[in-house]
Amino acid sequence: MKYIFSAICLIAFSMTGPSQFLLKKEVDGVQFYTKWGHEKWLSKKSPKVLLVKIVNTTPYAVEFDLGVEFFMNMMLIEESKAKSYCLSGGKTLLPRVSGLLYKPEGVDPDSLDSFELSGLDIKKATIKDCSAWDRK
């Protein structure tokens, strides 16, 4: 009975599951995936935000800044403040866990033309650097 219930839940979730992340940019072995979603997971009433997932495909740690620029009618309407990140080799930063949620203020995300990721100057770091960053 437990297996039947699990199978039904898995099928139901896969039919209504969230959209997939799309690769937006890759810089020096670090991949940046994005998708639009809701600020609170499984809450359609929460504000729409841009979710960014970051995957470090290199064997070494990296440091970088990340910001987002939002465009409407081909004009920059808002730019988020860049935040610094450190990511160990082969690791992934998930949006909700790492605070990689970006919301344009005062603008409906559906009315935006596009967005760009900015500040992606990838630098090698040490594992010690990333350990200190993880404790912040």
Image (cartoon, helix red, strand yellow):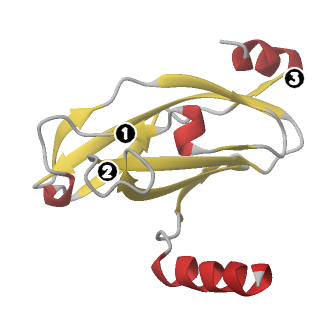
Disc 1 crowd rating (10 Å Cα; few below 14, some 14-19, many 20+) is many
Question: What is the spatial separation of the Cα atoms under label 2 and label 3, in whole angstroms?
Answer: 31 Å
Residue 113, by quadrant, is bottom left
Q: Is label 2 in contact with label 3 (beta carbons under 8 Å)?
A: no
Disc 3 crowd rating (10 Å Cα; few below 14, some 14-19, many 20+) is some
54 vs 81, left or right, is: right
Type of the residue with mark 1: Tyr
106 vs 9, left or right, is: left
Decide: is 7 above or below 37.
below
Q: Is mark 1 on a helix, strand or loop?
A: strand
In percent of width and height, residue 74 lies at: 15, 53
**Residue under the image location 13 percent in, 44 percent down:** 107
**Residue under the image location 65 percent in, 12 percent down:** 136
Type of the residue with mark 2: Phe
Residue furthest to the front = 1
Question: What is the spatial separation of the Cα atoms under label 1 and label 3, in whole angstroms?
Answer: 27 Å
**Residue under the image location 72 percent in, 20 percent down:** 134
Disc 3 target residue: 127
Residue 102's disc number: 1
Residue 62's disc number: none
Q: What element carries label 2?
A: strand
Mark found first going from the N terminus, 1 or 3: 1
Decide: is 60 above or below 16.
above
Q: Is mark 3 on a helix, strand or loop?
A: helix
Image quadrant in which the N terminus is located: bottom right
Of discs 1 and 3, which sits in the foreground?
1
Q: Is label 2 in contact with label 1 (beta carbons under 8 Å)?
A: yes
**Residue under the image location 37 percent in, 58 percent down:** 36
Mark found first going from the N terminus, 2 or 1: 1
Of discs 2 and 1, which sits in the foreground?
1
